[in-house]
Structure formats: structure tokens, C-alpha cells
Image (cartoon, rainbow, N blue to C red):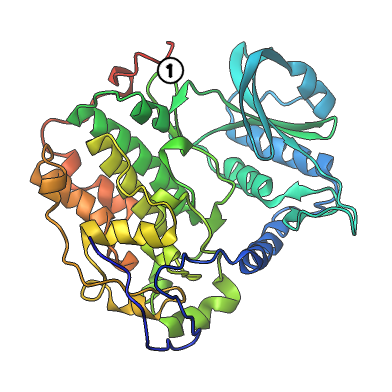
Amino acid sequence: MVKRVKKSAEKTGKARKLNEGVKLKEEKDDEIKSENTETVEDSKDLKNVDNVDKNVQKINEEVDDKQEDSVTDSNGSDSLDKRFTPVGKHLGEGTYGQVIKAMDTLTGKMVAIKKVKNIEYKKGVTKDRQLVGMVGIHFTTLRELKVMTELSHENLMGLVAVYVKEGFINIVMDIMASDLKKVVDAKVRLTEPNVKCIMSQILTGLSVLHASSFAHRDLSPANIFIDTFGVCKIADFGLARRTVNPPIFRDCSDLETMELNASRERMTSKVVTLWYRAPELLMGAECYHFACDLWSVGCIFGELLSGKPLFPGTNEIDQLGKIYNLLGTPENSWPQASKLPLYTQYSFSKPKDLSLHFQHANSVTLDLLSKLLKLNPNERISAKEALDHEYFKVQPLKCKPIDLPFDFITK
């Protein structure tokens, strides 16, 4: 087991002391400052952000342009509210609202409606510093609408409509039967064709997202939804961020390059669920690219192969320890990591043989997994390259989505 060791040398740039046995301190002020910087960029995407109804109408017009059966009524939110009739119990509840099941009376199809509370900003009263505009649109809601409005693909969660009612922004989406986390938790036995089918869909959706310059930044099994036909859709775009093409950051791990790009492309590292968070983020990188999503996909891949989380860390320090225990420490494979703000030295460890950890996986499978789980983000395979990997070409080939063994999903 690799162990964290005391680092005596002072790093160039940001000097930081991390004493043995002390957990990495969550720097909330820095996190909020970084997120607020990103929020300023979000506010530029909607003109007159303080007028929710105008922006909602604009979004619906864009959605209609992409749908073959244009169904938005020109009367606006009142008409849309009557169009969607709540059915049954709530589907779920989150930090900023709840999700309900509803019937689209115009199409006869079932939909899911995410109801997000619209908080009016009051100076000296409202504590949430991550709201955009005086109407209190949270930046995660703004980002989600931005991505869902711009992109339309079978493997990305679709936006049906959006309207405002009684202080809530109602985001109408495709209704899904389950998610990948529930599949793993249910201990569903997945064959190689099953895993290939799921992975192919995730990578396809991600390649579309990346082709439009969006990094998801929150991929996990809980954010991969599945419909009754076995179609997988990437969802929850609240942390998605548009970024420049990766080649500009080929030396992203280099501190000098990070500083050169910081004023324009500084992003928070406090993204992605801990178990699926890339090493560069765990070490405080603020200049990163799509590769962080591919690491998450690698973790999901490993989970599908083994039936359990690959790196179930309890905190950032423990998370890095679990990663290094399997993949080795970065001294040889990624020496530039030592320049990252929160780099912590661990006792040297060599990479383990993945075939010992995944005893039922063949060499082609492990080759793709290893390319997704490269410590150095610049060496990680892209979503497009992964789809072209030999893994998807050799027998047995992937099954059809409808043939996935999701019997626990009501069809």
C-alpha cells in the first residue's frame, strides 16, 4: 500500500505545507471564488438574464428548431404548464429542486420535469453567491439549459421544453427508467457484449459533447441514465463548461503554461464526484481539458468490469492513495505532476498488473482501460479514439441496447 510522505521541498509558485496525517483542507473560499469566476462566463450566454420569461421563450424557440414536431405554443409558460400534467409520485429530489413525472398532452408521451426554485436575489439577505442575475438563476441551471439547448443526440439527455411557474423554472426532459448506478448496485451480471454496448453509448455521447467543446466534469454511474429500451444518456450538465481545444493545453500539467492561460481559462478543480475525479483535479489543476472526463469513463469502465467502484476513496488524500496503489505513483509516468498546486508526495510504487485485478478481462479490454486511466492527462485516449479502439471491433461484438439485461426496469 502506498503511503503519503512528508514533502520538505518548497514548490515553485504556490508553496503549501501538507503535514503527515492531516487531511487535505477543503478551501471553500477559493472554491467559491473560482466558481463565481466561471459564473460570470455563464451570465454572458443569456442576454437580459434578469428576465427569466424572455430567456425561457428564447430557449424554447431554439428547442423547437431542432425538433421535427415543433410543439411549443406561442402563448408561452401558461400554455406549457397546461400541456404537461403531473402523473404519480415524484421521481427524485436534489439540492435545487425536485423531479416529477408528467404526461405531455400534446404528444401523449411521458416526460420528466425538473422543478428548480427561482430565488430572487436580495442584497444583504441572499447568501448563495453562485446565482446569476437578480432573478437568482443558479449557475448550474444556466449551464444545464445551455448544453441541452445546443446539443441534440440519442446518448445525451434531451430537452423537451422549459417554462416558469410559481417561482420555479420547469425543465422538461426525456423520461428515463433507471441509471447506471442502480444497475451496478443491483449486481446485474453483465456480459462482455453488454459492457461494450454501454461503453459505446457513453463514449458516443461524450464525443458529441467534446466535439462541441463542452467538458462534462461530473461523469459517474449516477449521471448515466437508461430508458426502457436500454438507451444510455449522459445527463446532469450543471457543471459542464465550454473550453478550448485540448492541443492548447498539451503541457497543461506545466505550471508556466497554466499561469499563461489562467486569466482566460482558469477553472475550478472542485468538480466530479470524488471516486471518479481525475488525478490532475485532485492535485488542484485549474487548467485542464476533456481528459478529466475520460478518466471518469475509465473508472466507470472498471466498475462495470468488476461490479464495484474502482477507487472508493474517503477523501482526496485517500483517493490519490487508492489510485497510486493500482496505477503506481507519477514520478516516472507524469513527472510534471509535482508542479501542480496540491501535489503531495507518496512512497514510490510501481503500477500493478491490471490482469490480476480484472481476472476475467482479456488483453484488449485491459488495453483500453489502461489508456483511459493514464495518470498523465495528456496521454489519455480521447472519446473518439476510444470508440475506434480494437475493443469494439473484436468478437464478441456489442449487443443491441434493447438486449441489455435490465429486467428490473419496467418495460
**Front position in the image: 126 or 106:** 126
Residue placed farthest to the front in the image? 21
Q: How many marks?
A: 1
Residue 319 is drawn in which quadrant? bottom left
- Residue 67 percent across, percent down from the top left: 59, 30
Quarter of the picture containing the C terminus is top left
Vertical position of residue 116 compared to residue 287: above or below? above
Asked if residue 290 lies left or right of residue 192, the reply is: right
Specify few, some or many for label 1: CA neighbours under 10 Å numbering under 14, 14-19, or 20 or more. some
Residue at position x 40%, y 66% in the image: 280
Q: Is residue 289 visible in this depiction of the protein?
A: no
For image coordinates 49% across by 81% down, the residue present is 16
Q: Quadrant of residue 405?
A: top left
Residue linked to disc 1: 228
Residue 146 in picture, x, y percent from top left: 63, 47
Which quadrant would residue 108 be assigned to in this image?
top right
Depth check, front residue: 100 or 351: 351
Q: Is residue 17 left or right of residue 263?
A: left
Query: Which amino acid type corresponds to the residue marked 1 in the rendered image?
Result: Thr
Decide: is 350 above or below 301.
Answer: below
Expressed as whole percent of the image width and height from the top left, the position of residue 410 reads 44, 11
Q: Determine whether 311 is above or below 307 in the image.
A: below
Which image quarter is the N terminus in? bottom left
Position of 52 with respect to 115 (left or right) is right
Q: What is the x, y in percent for residue 148? A: 58, 41
Q: Which residue is at the front of the view, 60 or 281?
A: 281
Residue at image coords 47%, 80%: 17
Of helix, strand and loop, which one carries label 1?
Answer: loop
53 sits left or right of 216 in the view: right
Residue 27 shows up from this direction: yes
